[in-house]
Amino acid sequence: IEDKAITLSRCNYENKELVLEEKDIPSVGNYPGEDCKEGKWDTEPVAGIIVTKDLEFTYTYAPKEVPQYIVPKDLTATYGQILKSVTLPNGWEWNDAGSEVGNVGEHAFGAKFTPEDTDNYVSVETRITVKVTAIKVSVTAGSLSKEYDGTPLTAETYTQEGLLEGDRIASITITGSQTGPGSSDNVPSAAKIVNADGEDVTDCYDITYVNGKLTVAEHSFDKEVADAKYQKSAADCSHAAVYYKSCSKCGAAGTETFESGEPLGHKWKAATGDAPKTCEVCGITEGDVIKYISVSGDTVEWTEGDGSLTLTFKRSEQDELCFQNYKETLIDQNPVKVEAKAGSTVITIDEATLKTFAAGTHTITAVFADASSEVKLLIKEPVVDAPESPKTGDSLPGLPPAIVLLAAIAAASAIVVKRRFVVEK
């Protein structure tokens, strides 16, 4: 670091004084180098002082300091990029931002850090590591097709997408062959990629291989012939017959199908009380089981003296078939004689039959050809009214009062006994 100095000498004339003027003081603003910053005088010269002897004023510049900084880490780039695409933190810049990042791997590049306070701190240059990763590229094998001629079909062509300008595929393996009718994969592999200088840069690419397709077509399966030899499946209740399409050239059966004709339709077996309507051919069911419903309710009551009992049953579907399917009536699983007539099905049980059953709960079952229906029968005890007793003191014609009184007492006893019997019953 150079010193700026002023040396002032007294005049040779004896007793002559020298006055320091402003023009005698040099400027110290221009630093002698970028690494210097503002310094200071050892003794600051001031205009107007009187110099009586040789004096020397020295100004010394100070060196700038090195700033604190952090070298950027974990920087990445992709093969083919330039340094400018790799972003640095504030204050940093690449020495050569236009240079390429190079092949896959870790590379160090020159960079400079410039502090905000450039008056007191110097800029710092160092090297920063950048990790370069592979770039994606896809390679697709060619696809070909032809009519069958007995010779192998191959395709050694390919296409690529993603190679950088100047790079090319120097060699590649394509594996695939199809001789007979059908198709198979045409498989690419082992591509070698070089740059404009012929250097192997395969490792700089993340290669995705896509298979092509080799197809040999011998037949034209475009003819629809509804013949037994082409039949895949016979017609059933819901579907028409299905046949394979055949080759219009040689008649061979293909794999595509077509339908011909109409479905056979279902052969329905009528519903019963145990099963809904069922197709006898395919077994599919439809609807619900047959039920016979008592219009008179689930429970009926009858008391001796009510006369006959009439019940009406309706069929859950096709009620017009209700009466013709009627078979018999049971009470407690025992057949009974009834009068049955149409109008749904109307069953009348006469009083004489009902009187043969004791008081209590019984089950009436109407039996039909395809189901049955049950109704609870509640037979009640008849209520017996007691005879009216003669008034005390009344006498019967022609009888003495004492005899009349005894007769009244006997009648009252009989009434009590009768009522007790009904309750216990």
Image: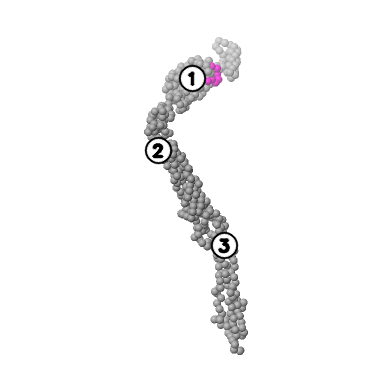
Give the vertical position of 97 relative to 406 (above or below): below
Residue 410 in picture, x, y percent from top left:
60, 14
Q: Three-letter amino acid code at disc 3?
A: Thr
Residue at the bottom extreme of this rendering: 14
Q: Which of marks 3 and 1 is nearer the N terminus?
A: 3
Q: How far apart are marks 3 and 2 (CA)?
A: 67 Å
| Residue linked to disc 1 | 367
Apparent side of residue 403 relative to residue 165 in the rendered image (left or right): right
Q: Earlier in the sequence, mark 3 or mark 2?
A: 3
Q: In this figure, what is the number of numbered marks? A: 3
Q: Quick one: label 1, few (<14), some, or many (20+) residues within 10 Å? A: some
Looking at the magenta stretch, what is its main secondary structure? strand
Q: Which label is found at residue 147?
A: 2
**Mark toward the start of the polypeptide (1 vs 2):** 2
Residue 392 in view: no
**Which region shows up in magenta?**
357-367
Which dot, 3 or 2, sits closer to the camera? Answer: 2
Q: In which quarter of the image is the N terminus?
A: bottom right
Q: Is residue 361 magenta?
A: yes
Work out how far the residue at label 3 is from the one at label 1, CA to CA, in angstroms: 108 Å
Q: Magenta segment: does it hold 203?
A: no
Q: Give how far across and how far down residue 301 sits, in percent.
A: 51, 21
| Disc number lying in front (1 or 2) | 2
Side (left or right) of 165 relative to 10: left
Q: Residue 126 carries which label?
A: 3
Q: Under tag 1, what secondary structure?
A: strand
